[in-house]
Image (cartoon, helix red, strand yellow):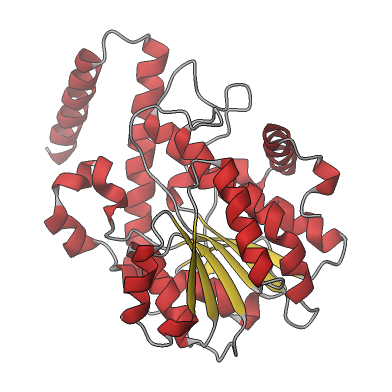
Amino acid sequence: MALYIATAVITAAAAIYWYVNRHKPMKHILSELRYALDMQGAGAGGLIDDWVSVWRNKITLPDANNKIAVITGGARGIGSEVVRGMLKANMIVIMGVRNTESAKKLANSMQNGDKLHAFQLDLQSLNSVKHFAENVLKEFPQIHILVNNAGIMFGDYKLTEDGFENQFAVNHLSHFYLTHLLLPALKRAGTVEEPSRVVNVTSCAHYPGKIYFDDINMKEHYDTTAAYAQSKLAQLMTARYVNSLLEDKDVPVKCYSVHPGIVDTDLFEHSNFGKLPWARRLFFKTPEKGAISILFTCFDRHIIKKGGMYISNCKEGFSNRFSKNETHQKALFDLSCNLLGIEANKYGK
């Protein structure tokens, strides 16, 4: 009986979905439906992992002794808790935020708040990314940790001022560019015993994704869910590929990607959960708990020799097959360099 009911519900949902979207070509309807279902599956899997791994999700903060960390975002949500943890670890923290006044308020509420600095950064503008990097490097020629944290999720189709799909630009391409600009400072700070680290904050939402190499801006057909999955997958793949490039040249910098968990933040504003705040509070992690896996990736010494790893709940997470394909990784790296006008062999130099 339960099977019949479930089948009927799924069939009815599919019929309603088709009716609402009947003006679209069938191939696009089927693609959107697949992404919607796969994303729900990835989210459910992420929630289960959060629940069963709660005992692993912990970090002992070291004394980082005035080492330098740069983080994009950080004024709210998970990012603000990562900043709080870094300051507790005695780091000097530089935030890249759109409104630098928000950092001043944050500093007043945090231990070691006098070690918090902020420069203006808008990830929808490559020119802003460049100016942010220049401002950071003027004052901090060495950087020990870069956390590519800021991100957006879903929303209508939009191109940035540079002509890139908004989610791909904010979540991946601007961080890819920032990493390129700051890598010289990361190299200067790193040592063989204690390499500098680049931490890309990705998501289990990468799992249904693929990279649309022939239509990276998704102009033919825009599915906001597919675009988000693409951008998060790109962050994971970049961490793996750039780490392999650096390891081949014995550069003392390690790259990682990390899924913080399913966390109750305003990132869900444009999702179905945007209308269900009680469900988020009941089932999702708090931002404080979401920050733990990121801080683990920043500080844990046991992963020093595991550069390129994808981390979830302070352990290696499950990533999709597309992300592990080295040909796809190189293709994404080359495409990203080309979009930014960077010669691939000069990345990070």
In the displayed orientation, state which residue is furthest to the right: 249
The C terminus lies in which quarter of the figure? bottom right
How many discs appear?
A: 0
The N terminus lies in which quarter of the figure? top left
Q: Residue 91 falls in which quadrant of the image? A: bottom right
Residue 117 versus residue 274: which sits nearer the camera?
Answer: 117
Q: Residue 348 falls in which quadrant of the image? A: bottom right
330 in relation to 59, above or below? above
Q: Position of residue 224 (x, y in %)?
A: 38, 31
Q: Where is residue 102 in the image (x, y as percent from the top left)?
A: 34, 65
Residue located 19% across and 37% down the image? 3
Residue 48 seen in render: yes
Residue 298 versus residue 100: which sits nearer the camera?
Answer: 100
16 in relation to 133, above or below? above
Q: Residue 256 falls in which quadrant of the image? A: bottom right
Residue 321 seen in render: no
Instruction: Tell me if 343 is positioned left or right of 150 in this view.
Output: right
Q: Position of residue 135 (x, y in %)?
A: 61, 61
289 in relation to 2, above or below? below
Residue 247 versus residue 145: which sits nearer the camera?
Answer: 145
25 in relation to 112, above or below? above
Q: Position of residue 212 (x, y in %)?
A: 57, 28
